[in-house]
């Protein structure tokens, strides 16, 4: 398994990273230029996985630099560009949700999880605000079918104190008409501790 | 959300249940009989989810009636009929795996989890042997695209003592050429406890 | 095989017909309202086939009522709403093209075929301007896979004099993110005469 | 547009050619060996198009060497290996069919077209028996979506006398569970002659 790492950089530009993930490979090279191909490639999946981590670090960085307002605006951009709430309910089970608010199938619920500050989700403290500085992921396996791809593996997040949090993570991506991969499935869970 | 329940029945026939799940809907009614349709339907997804629980109860029941050998044979049938190990590595994160054996992308790893008794997976004690008698599931959301479907929600399992275990569960199904739905993704995790 | 017929009506509103074809069935009823389904249904295919004929009759009708300018504007709307030139080259082999301009993979080539008047396509006389008043189609077979559907069968067009033209017709439809079916394949040919 | 040519060779082995077309690319290289990918590639499409011509020439060659019985056996192998009659009705409109037998949605109808000799299809004289020696194809455009691909372009067939027959050809391929591409759509027509 290849290890993928993204470090915080002072000049990290979120939109650049997301744009890099939005590889529009709809027109291929074979048969001249006359091939239209709507499928996801493994490279696009990897780019989308990198973009997710970069976005999380960006929100943390923006929170430090510009406070809640700036972090929330960035989180909203991430949700609108990289998640599939524009398609339908997203199958999202974040790491730290509980009770009757485990599943965050709406954009509002996802935003509350990432930045908190929503009275309707009173236990949310803002997962993306916790000063994340480094992101790594390892895929155990990937399944690609048409414009859908599913990944399963580990994600390792490092905060400012150097503490590493490891989670078991499943993502499902769907490529939209513009060639962007959108997260339609996100199941994250803490490792089982026997 | 609709609640789906399956109780243990003395005469439960596993193959019947799995066969019921294997709805081959490749030829539709519209336009006479001339429509071929390879897509998954919501009804097939629900049938496959029911079949998973029925299979788990069956393994428990077979263990009680026929011991390890019988339970293992049943578990192998379930893996061969309802999982996608014949397609490639399955994205399987069982509820109770840990350490460097969290992901069970091989048939051997999945079998070890369900019935134990494999020296290469020394911490596995056989999840399906724990006397499960009742199974319920609630979907939070379902995403269908082509011959793929993803579900996310809760599964509630009741053992002989009446104790209920609830897990957060994601499944990914792929419909094969014969019309059978196969599990290519299975992420199960205990609820987060703040 | 069911026969489908569309007659010219004085008040035929093209956009209404196309809108009716644009059935957005992305959110189903099963499991409550939580199912997202991106697949094409047989009903959507039939609606799109009806819409194609209605659009052709509309262009003929507009040509009679408003001349070339009106007919061309309608044809452009049809191409932009019902064909996939926004996705990539369309696999379009019209009934009456020949020489080195058989395939109309560009929007310009398709528009020239339907309404003529383009010096770059000098043999085109405007297929849609020929006073079509009635449209029928019969599918021999339909194949549906994911967000793609292919149909093959006969199309019968009747002009003002009552003369019927029958063609062998293949269509390929792709459902876009908004739920609209777009023609990405269109092969039309006159019957072989031994 | 690239031109693809296949000449008759004395030692042409049909099954070798078909096997070459049956590229099973389900497990990719990215992320180690853990990627399962069920999609069609442009290379697989091109290989399947080559295999079709090689098979046609093989039937002609077998007819010359072994008569009707041998040619028919080869044609049956081609239909069973390279067409999708095992999936459902195939959308097949051969070049030279007419009347109420234009569409050959059944295996029997396709076999009759290729080798003749079937009383139920009295006008069929065996298209594949006509001494084809050379095959070329040019794609005008290709559309790939999931495990489906559609091609449109020209096919040029040369017989023993050197006469070239050109047809307008559309193919639809579906990749099956074993990684083989199967023809589920085949629309062939003589060029329109104004």
Image (tube, coloured by chain):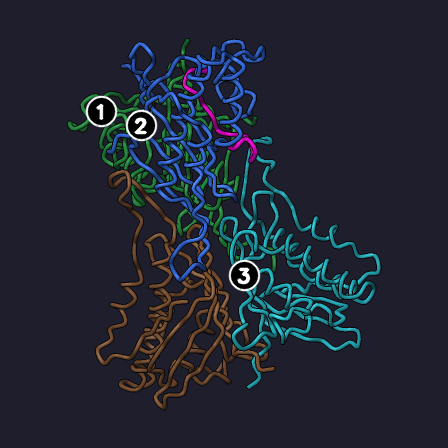
Chain colours: A brown, B cyan, C green, D blue
Q: Which residue is nearer to you in this view: B101 or D127? A: B101
Measured in 3D between alpha carbons, the distance from the residue under mark 2 to the one under mark 1, in whole angstroms, is 15 Å
- C21 w.r.t. B99: above or below: above
Mark 1: few/some/many CA within 10 Å (<14, 14-19, 20+): few
Which residue position is annotated with label 3? B185
Mark 3: few/some/many CA within 10 Å (<14, 14-19, 20+): many
Is mark 2 in CB contact (under 8 Å) with mark 1? no
* Place of residue B66 in the rendered image (x, y in percent of width and height, measured from the top left): 81, 63
Q: Quadrant of the N terminus of chain A?
A: bottom left
Q: Quick check: can you spot residue D190? A: yes
Say what secondary structure mark 3 lies in: strand
Measured in 3D between alpha carbons, the distance from the residue under mark 3 to the one under mark 2, in whole angstroms, is 41 Å
Labels 3, 1: front one:
3
Say what secondary structure mark 1 lies in: helix
- Residue B30 image-quadrant placement: top right
Residue D144 in the magenta stretch? The answer is no
- Residue D17 image-quadrant placement: top left
Residue, far bottom: A161
Which residue position is annotated with label 1? C100
Q: Quadrant of the C terminus of chain A?
A: bottom right
Query: Relative to D172, is D110 on the left or the right?
Result: right
- C103 w.r.t. D36: above or below: above
* Place of residue D126 in the rendered image (x, y in percent of width and height, measured from the top left): 47, 13
The magenta region covers: D84-98
Asked if both marks, 3 and 2, belong to the same chain, the answer given is: no
* Place of residue C45 in the rendered image (x, y in percent of width and height, measured from the top left): 48, 38
Label drawn at residue D137:
2
- A186 w.r.t. A113: above or below: above
Say what secondary structure mark 2 lies in: strand
* Place of residue A193 in the rendered image (x, y in percent of width and height, measured from the top left): 57, 82
């Amino acid at each position: 398994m290849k290890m993928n790492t993204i470090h915080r950089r002072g000049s990290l530009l979120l939109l650049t990273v997301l744009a890099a993930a939005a590889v529009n490979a709809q027109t291929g090279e074979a048969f001249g230029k006359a091939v239209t191909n709507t499928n996801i490639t493994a490279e696009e999946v990897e780019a989308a996985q990198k973009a997710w981590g970069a976005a999380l670090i960006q929100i943390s960085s923006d929170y430090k630099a510009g406070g809640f307002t700036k972090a929330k605006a960035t989180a909203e951009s991430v949700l609108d560009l990289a998640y599939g709430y524009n398609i339908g309910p997203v199958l999202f089970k974040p790491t730290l949700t509980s009770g009757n608010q485990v599943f965050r199938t709406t954009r509002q619920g996802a935003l509350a999880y990432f930045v908190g500050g929503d009275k309707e989700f009173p236990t949310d403290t803002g997962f993306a605000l916790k000063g994340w500085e480094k992101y790594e992921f390892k895929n155990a396996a990937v399944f690609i079918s048409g414009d859908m791809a599913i990944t399963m593996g580990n994600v390792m997040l490092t905060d400012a104190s150097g503490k590493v949090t490891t989670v078991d993570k499943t993502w499902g991506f769907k490529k939209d008409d513009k060639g962007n991969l959108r997260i339609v499935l996100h199941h994250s869970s803490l490792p089982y501790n026997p």
